[in-house]
Image (tube, rainbow, N blue to C red):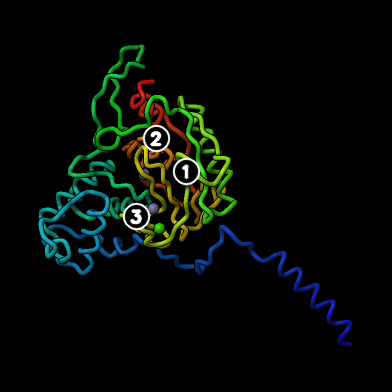
Amino acid sequence: MAFKIFPLISFLFLIFILLAPSGHAKRSIPSGKKTSAFDFIKKLKGCHKGNTTKGIHELKAYLEKFGYLRYPNKTQATDDDFDDILESAIKTYQENYHIKPSGVMDDETISKMTTPRCGVPDIVNGTNYMQPRNRNHKSGSSGVHVVSHYSFFEGEPKWPPSKTHLTYRFLPNVPAVAMDPVARAFQKWQSSTHFTFARAQTDQNSDLVIGFYRGDHGDIDPFDGPGGTLAHAFAPTNGRFHYDADEQWSIGSVADAFDYETVALHEIGHLLGLRHSSVEAAIMYSEISAGQTKNLHEDDIAGIRDLYNL
Ligand code: ZN
Ligand code: CA
Ligand code: ZN
């Protein structure tokens, strides 16, 4: 009988193989309760000045990472004392994310702070890049004074005028499925700017380099496992853009996963010289939720045109 059962078992095994989730985008995160690198913030619900709740030091580290505070000494930075400096940092965060600046860890603040985001800080050396500034746009043929929300890196670094064609390459650690979405993201920036992009013909010498890393990979900002920080990129003319390999990545909108192309659009914005925008619909807004897809927004286009005098 065995010789009759064997083909049946083989057949069932084949079916199992065919139906089993394949590979790349499905790293095994246990179903049910998912943990995210920013989940610790939820424990601080309702916290305010004067509290000494366990875990406040983690919030201090979070706000320091994204530029909202810097303590004069390590003791203050690592204790669980909800002090004046922390309250003021939370108020600045709330202003940047259009929440009533109460300085209290209310529901809305918790919800914003736990949303996955880009690792590039919102504030550097005390300069709050997300605060709206008034600018006169020469593009405003109507003469209307436009309030813009996009921002640039310190010193407004950008690609030189002669450098309008930029090549990119993928490090060997980039999964093949990510390549088309990244190419589409470059295409979208190309159709809205004076830049043209092409994948480098060789694996050496390109202006831009895309990589996939987990945890500490030698950058100032180590990745943090699933959730939390999703990616980061550097100002011109550095050219490096890294995805966090510990995320669930997807092509398009997939529940509990992050869209390769949307995140690439955002990070390419950094590679070209844009910093974060406080406009929620802009691609340069720092946060993105799982399952969300976004496109370039007029705020992003206005930013790049302003930076390069287009
Ligand atoms: Zn960013
Ligand atoms: Ca992460
Ligand atoms: Zn990196």
Q: Residue at x 47, y 58 (%)?
A: 245
- Find disc 1 in the rendering and name its residue: 264
Provide residue 82's location: percent of width, then percent of height. 14, 60
In terms of image quarters, where does ligand 1 lie? top left
What element does badge 2 sit on?
helix
Which of 146 and 45 lies nearest the eye of the viewer? 146
Q: Residue at x 34, y 50 (%)?
A: 119
Judge the density around disc 3: few (<14), some (14-19), many (≥20) Cα neighbours within 10 Å. few
Q: Answer with mark 3 or mark 2, whichever residue precedes in sequence.
A: 3
The kind of residue on which mark 2 rests is Leu
- Mark 3 lies within 8 Å of ligand 3 (Cβ measured): yes
The kind of residue on which mark 1 rests is Ala
Locate the C terminus by quadrant: top left
Q: CA distance from mark 3 to mark 2?
A: 19 Å
- Find disc 2 in the rendering and name its residue: 272
Q: Residue at x 35, y 35 (%)?
A: 273
Residue 225 seen from this side? yes
What element does badge 1 sit on?
helix
Q: CA distance from mark 1 to mark 2?
A: 12 Å
Residue 304 to residue 88: above or below: above
The kind of residue on which mark 3 rests is Asp
Numbered badge on residue 219: 3
- Mark 1 lies within 8 Å of ligand 1 (Cβ measured): no
